[in-house]
Image: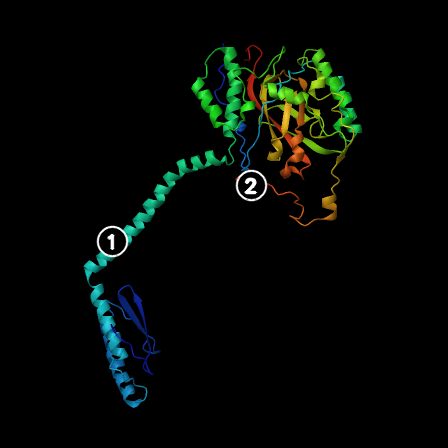
């Protein structure tokens, strides 16, 4: 007996968002990861998370481990085979150094509005 | 009509309401409102006569304060005004006309308010469609149809009519590149997957972050479960710091605590909304049903990047924290013997 699927999702999915700005919700470019039911790639994931913890959550220091994880997925047929260089893991795309915002504005205080350097265009000026 | 003489002894204040002039005597012991009607008549007349006598006496004694103009005295004016008012208020036709006029004004206001209530429904709908104020329901409908599209295709039950599909796409805010091409372009199951968009593939291949002194954006993760779902769904790391243009990986862990296989669907949200414009996910676990066996724990990765245009957006020049929040909703819960999908 085929179970009757409801024709509407439960009302809880209609999340009320009253902000007047447009919400951009886009589908993923390469679709959905299949579920890793047997946790085959869990060790790689744990190594990656450890690295993140050690490097203050900066991803570019743990790039190789994330590459390994994706490679593991591909090997176990949990992900379509792709050239990882084309997915942002090429050597030209390696981030050497990066800085985080040091909260200087909060520390030193500021006058509201004085920080605007560039004039933004209104919608009718574009 | 009547001229009022300011006598040293007696002062009158008169006001005009429409065509009627109501006069009040403001002298202390004689202050009375000149009223129409039978009851107060004798009393007022008596008072008026008394005041007439008094003023005549006083006017004789104070000759200097008399005006030289040929006018009626204040008392006379008062009396005449009083008489006029009394006559007009006894005129039933006049009263009736006035009452009808006021009643019709009031009825018009009521009918107008009622009409505005009914008119506001289509007007508000137009306003919302034009400005997109607080409306994400159309987008949700589109993805909902997209999921059910896959399910329907597999079950072979009903087919969404092309006209309805086109209408939904027309109403939604999803930009054209991101629309599902044809049917079933959301990949599912194991096997070969195809790009949903060739342009995005090319873009990803050429993606390059600023390699020196890039700006680190902190991407925080937040997770929510629908109300009655016996899952626990948490991010495996609280946040990750990425440079715009760098592809990053992050994990969520979900565990099914119940003794039934439960299917859930996730949606996501990026805050601030402007940052959502530049937030691209290469692969994730959202918008498609994920089925967890009872007691199962599963790691779900999200592979994403922030568009390098983030650095050029003046509205985001001071935004260094982005929050990616996932919400899981239950869609189906089945026992062992039933087949899902």
Residue farthest along the front direction in this orientation: A125
Pointers 1 and 2 within a single chain: no
The quarter of the image holding the C terminus of chain B is top right
The quarter of the image holding the N terminus of chain B is bottom left
The disc numbered 1 marks a residue on which chain? B
At x 67%, y 34%, the residue is B311
> Can you give x and y, in whole percent of width and height, for residue B60 in the image?
27, 89
| Pick the front one: B104 or A116 | A116
Q: Residues within 10 Å of mark 1 (few under 14, many from 20)?
A: few
Describe residue B24's horizontal placement relative to residue B226 as left or right.
Answer: left
| Pick the front one: B28 or B250 | B250
Q: Give the color scheme: rainbow, by chain, secondary structure or one colour.
A: rainbow
Mark 2, residue position = A122
**Separation of residues labelled 1 and 2 (CA atoms):** 54 Å
Position of residue B57 relative to residue B110, above or below, is below
SS of the residue at dot 1?
A: helix
> Can you give x and y, in whole percent of width and height, for residue B220 in the image?
68, 32
Position of residue B104 relative to residue B201, above or below, is below
Mark 1, residue position = B100
At x 56%, y 41%, the residue is A122
> Can you give x and y, in whole percent of width and height, for residue B29 in the image?
34, 78
Q: Quadrant of residue B313?
A: top right
Q: Quadrant of residue B72?
A: bottom left
At x 52%, y 15%, the residue is B183
Residues at circles 1 and 2 in contact by the CB criterion of under 8 Å: no
The disc numbered 2 marks a residue on which chain? A
Can residue A91 be seen in the rendering of this structure?
Answer: yes
SS of the residue at dot 2?
A: loop
């Amino acid at each position: 007996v085929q179970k009757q699927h409801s024709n509407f999702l439960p009302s809880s999915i209609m999340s009320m968002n009253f902000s007047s700005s447009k919400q951009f919700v886009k589908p993923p470019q390469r679709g959905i990861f299949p579920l890793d039911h047997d946790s085959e790639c869990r060790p790689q994931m744990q190594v990656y998370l450890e690295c993140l913890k050690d490097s203050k959550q900066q991803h570019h220091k743990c790039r190789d481990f994330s590459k390994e994880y994706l490679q593991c997925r591909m090997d176990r047929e949990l992900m379509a085979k792709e050239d990882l260089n084309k997915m942002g893991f090429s050597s030209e795309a390696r981030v050497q150094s990066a800085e985080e915002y040091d909260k200087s504005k909060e520390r030193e205080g500021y006058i509201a509005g004085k920080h605007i350097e560039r004039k933004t265009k209104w919608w009718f000026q574009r | 009509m009547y001229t009022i003489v300011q006598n040293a002894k007696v002062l009158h204040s008169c006001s005009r309401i429409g065509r009627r002039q109501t006069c009040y005597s403001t002298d202390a012991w004689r202050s009375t409102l000149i009223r129409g009607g039978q009851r107060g008549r004798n009393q007022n007349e008596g008072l008026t006569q008394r005041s007439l006598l008094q003023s005549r006496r006083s006017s004789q004694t104070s000759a200097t304060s008399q005006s030289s103009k040929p006018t009626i005295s204040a008392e006379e004016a008062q009396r005449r005004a009083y008489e006029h008012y009394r006559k007009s208020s006894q005129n039933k036709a006049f009263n009736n006309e006035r009452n009808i006029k006021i009643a019709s004004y009031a009825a018009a206001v009521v009918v107008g308010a009622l009409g505005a209530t009914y008119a506001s429904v289509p007007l508000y709908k137009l306003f919302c469609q034009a400005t997109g104020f607080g409306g994400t329901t159309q987008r949700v409908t589109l993805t909902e149809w997209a999921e059910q599209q896959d399910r329907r295709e597999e079950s072979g039950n009903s087919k969404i009519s092309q006209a309805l599909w086109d209408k939904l796409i027309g109403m939604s805010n999803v930009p054209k590149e991101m629309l599902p091409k044809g049917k079933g372009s959301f990949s599912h199951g194991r096997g070969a997957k195809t790009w949903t968009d060739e342009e995005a593939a090319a873009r990803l291949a050429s993606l390059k972050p600023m390699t020196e002194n890039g700006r680190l954006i902190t991407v925080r993760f937040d997770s929510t479960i629908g109300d009655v779902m016996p899952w626990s769904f948490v991010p495996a790391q609280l946040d990750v710091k990425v440079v715009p243009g760098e592809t990053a990986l992050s994990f969520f862990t979900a565990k099914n605590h119940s003794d039934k296989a439960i299917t859930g669907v996730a949606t996501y949200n990026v805050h601030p909304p402007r940052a959502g414009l530049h937030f691209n996910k290469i692969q994730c676990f959202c918008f498609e049903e994920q089925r967890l066996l009872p007691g199962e724990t599963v790691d779900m990765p999200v592979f994403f990047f922030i568009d390098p245009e983030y650095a050029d957006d003046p509205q985001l020049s001071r935004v260094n924290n982005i929050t990616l929040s996932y919400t899981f909703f239950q869609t189906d819960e089945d026992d062992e013997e039933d087949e899902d999908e």
